[in-house]
Every structure is written in C-alpha cells, then in structure tokens.
Image: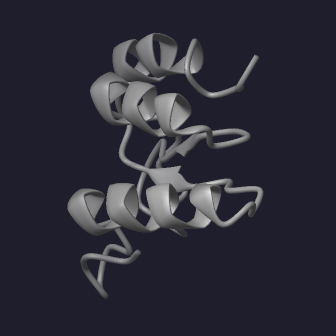
C-alpha cells in the first residue's frame, strides 16, 4: 500500500487493513512498512510471515537512515 508516489513510503493505515484481510483469507503476507517498531509489531501480530521495514527511500542509495529503529524493528521482522 503505497502512500506517497515520490518516496514510495507505505500508507500504514491501509497496510494494516490490507494485511489483516489477506492473512484472514489464507495468503502469506510479506509487507513492506515503515521502520516503526510499533507498526512491525502490529503486522507480526496480525500473522504476517515476515515484515520488511524500509531502511531508506527506495533507490536512494542512502543506506540505513535510522539504525536504532531498524534494530528495534528486527525482533518483529520474522514471524516465529
């Protein structure tokens, strides 16, 4: 669920709703999301198979912009 066409940042509200619906229908959901640990936890809790938090704007070559959030999000990035 792309929220901004320029940065390709996801629309978190729509992403959570879509992930919930798709998991309920039996799909294996692998969402791309913000590097927000709370969002990653919610997606994991919905039953997503893995969570892929963004490290930097797609195609920017900037590398990980917020190492703290990436480390915090990592515990939710793989569904046990």
Q: Which quadrant would the C terminus be assigned to in this image?
A: top right
Please provide percent x and percent y for residue 22: 59, 66
Say which residue appears at 29% left-offset and 68% top-offset: 14
Q: Is residue 23 above or below residue 8?
A: above
Please provide percent x and percent y for residue 29: 68, 56
> Residue pushed farthest bottom?
5
Say which residue appears at 41% left-offset and 75% top-offset: 1
Q: How many marks?
A: 0
Say which residue appears at 46% left-offset and 55% top-offset: 20
Colour scheme shown: one colour
Residue 28's image quarter?
bottom right
Q: Is residue 15 above or below residue 68?
A: below
Nearest the camera: 6 or 75?
75
Please provide percent x and percent y for residue 72: 43, 12
Say which residue appears at 71% left-offset and 25% top-offset: 79
- Lateral position of residue 4 relative to residue 68, left or right: left
- Lateral position of residue 28 relative to residue 8, left or right: right
Residue 17's image quarter?
bottom left
Q: Is residue 49 above or below residue 16?
A: above
Please provide percent x and percent y for residue 68: 37, 13
Q: Is residue 28 above or below residue 34?
A: below
């Amino acid at each position: 669920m792309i929220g901004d066409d320029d940065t390709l940042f996801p629309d978190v509200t729509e992403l959570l709703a879509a992930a919930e619906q798709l998991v309920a229908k039996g799909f294996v959901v692998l969402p791309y999301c913000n590097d927000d640990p709370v969002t990653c936890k919610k997606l994991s809790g919905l039953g997503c198979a893995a969570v892929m938090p963004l490290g930097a704007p797609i195609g920017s070559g900037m590398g990980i912009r917020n190492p703290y959030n990436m480390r915090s999000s990592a515990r939710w990035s793989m569904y046990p």
